């Protein structure tokens, strides 16, 4: 399905300003995200930061929740960054926006390459999801209404958790224990990895068998939760064929899946659209909330 972009002159100006900041600041991504987060203000949100979910590696997560949440759906959000960079604090705007709509958001950190290869960050992600499943009720969440969501590299991580059951098996969990998966411009079918992609070859391997372990499309069996795949057609970082390929495989296995293509929308705009100033760049938030409302259990409560 293809939907037209919803851009006001103000959002176009702000988007241009952010792109200018990227050029000026270069690699200073922390400053860029901090600037975006300063525009984000929501009332009635409670935040618990720096919860250690992995004592061995001192990995932490942040929880954003509506005040007095009860039986609320939960989203575990994995951020992108080419599996090499990124921090949970950068994505506060995602957490507060979801919480302002009645959804508890859990944003964990995970180890990156070259500190670890794929097994390392996938183990971290599985541990974060398992922690969320165990502790959801403590934050007013519904353990049967946990959604996994990811952008870019985080989309690959989340999708692999929801297709390859081996990652969650150590916690006696299965992908079907979760309410759904939401992928924002995720990497789902990206082999063979080009020879000049040194970091990707380092983390995923050089041979076909090793690279295949990283491809969510290779593990679809029909035992997956419903999925929502959102993708911009102007994405220069992750080819839209990734979302199309996963959609086709899921459909072939009769897994409920919705693919939405946003004309003219680029890679980072998919997640920046969760922020207040850039919300009109793409209907990412509206489509995400609609998917959650459609697939949550009758007992879970979300705001409209």
Image (cartoon, rainbow, N blue to C red):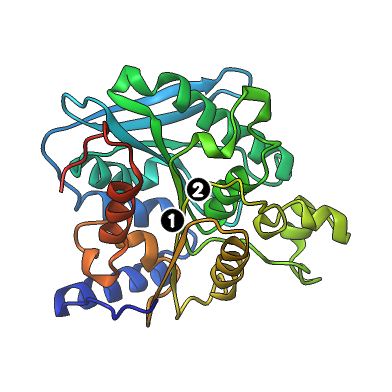
Question: In this rendering, which labeled residue sits more in front, label 1 or label 2?
Answer: 2
Quadrant including the N terminus = bottom left
- Front residue of this view, candidates 181 and 150: 181
The mark total stands at: 2
Q: Note whether residue 46 is visible.
A: yes
**What residue appears at the point 70 percent right and 52 percent down from the top-left corner?**
219
Q: Horizontal and vertical percent for residue 253?
A: 62, 59
Task: In the rendered structure, find residue 55 and report the number of the disc placed on it.
Answer: none
Q: Is residue 189 left or right of residue 52?
A: right
Looking at marks 1 and 2 on the same chain, the residue that comes earlier in the sequence is marked by 1
Give the farthest residue toward the left.
43
> Which residue matches tag 1?
29
- Front residue of this view, candidates 112 and 294: 294
Cα–Cα gap, marks 1 and 2: 8 Å
> Which residue matches tag 2?
86
The image shows residue 206, relative to residue 83, as above or below, that is below
**What residue appears at the point 50 percent right and 48 percent down from the top-left corner?**
86
Task: Say which quarter of the image contains residue 268.
Answer: bottom left
Q: Horizontal and vertical percent for residue 289?
A: 28, 52
Give the farthest residue toward the front.
254
């Amino acid at each position: 399905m293809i939907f037209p972009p919803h851009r006001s002159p103000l959002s176009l100006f702000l988007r241009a300003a952010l792109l200018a900041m990227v050029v000026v600041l270069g690699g200073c991504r922390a400053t860029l995200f901090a600037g975006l987060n300063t525009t984000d203000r929501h009332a009635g949100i409670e935040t618990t930061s720096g919860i250690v979910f992995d004592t061995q590696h001192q990995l932490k997560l942040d929880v954003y929740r509506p005040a007095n949440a009860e039986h609320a759906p939960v989203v575990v959000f994995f951020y992108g960054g080419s599996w090499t960079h990124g921090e949970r604090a950068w994505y506060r705007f995602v957490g507060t926006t979801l919480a302002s709509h009645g959804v508890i958001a859990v944003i964990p950190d995970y180890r990156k390459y070259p500190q670890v290869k794929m097994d390392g960050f996938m183990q971290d992600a599985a541990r974060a999801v398992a922690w969320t499943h165990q502790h959801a009720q403590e934050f007013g969440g519904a353990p049967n209404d946990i959604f996994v969501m990811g952008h870019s590299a985080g989309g690959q991580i989340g999708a692999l958790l929801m297709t390859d059951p081996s990652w969650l098996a150590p916690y006696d969990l299965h992908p079907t224990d979760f309410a759904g998966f939401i992928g924002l411009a995720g990497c789902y079918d990206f082999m063979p990895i080009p020879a000049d992609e040194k970091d990707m070859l380092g983390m995923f391997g050089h041979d076909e068998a090793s690279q295949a372990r990283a491809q969510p499309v290779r593990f679809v069996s029909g035992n997956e939760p419903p999925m929502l795949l959102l993708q911009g057609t102007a994405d220069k970082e992750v080819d839209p064929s990734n979302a199309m390929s996963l959609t086709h495989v899921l459909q072939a296995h009769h897994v409920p899946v919705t693919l939405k293509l946003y004309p003219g929308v680029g890679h980072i705009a998919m997640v920046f659209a969760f922020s207040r100033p850039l919300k009109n760049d793409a209907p990412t938030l509206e489509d995400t909330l609609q998917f959650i409302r459609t697939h949550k259990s009758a007992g879970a409560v979300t705001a409209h």
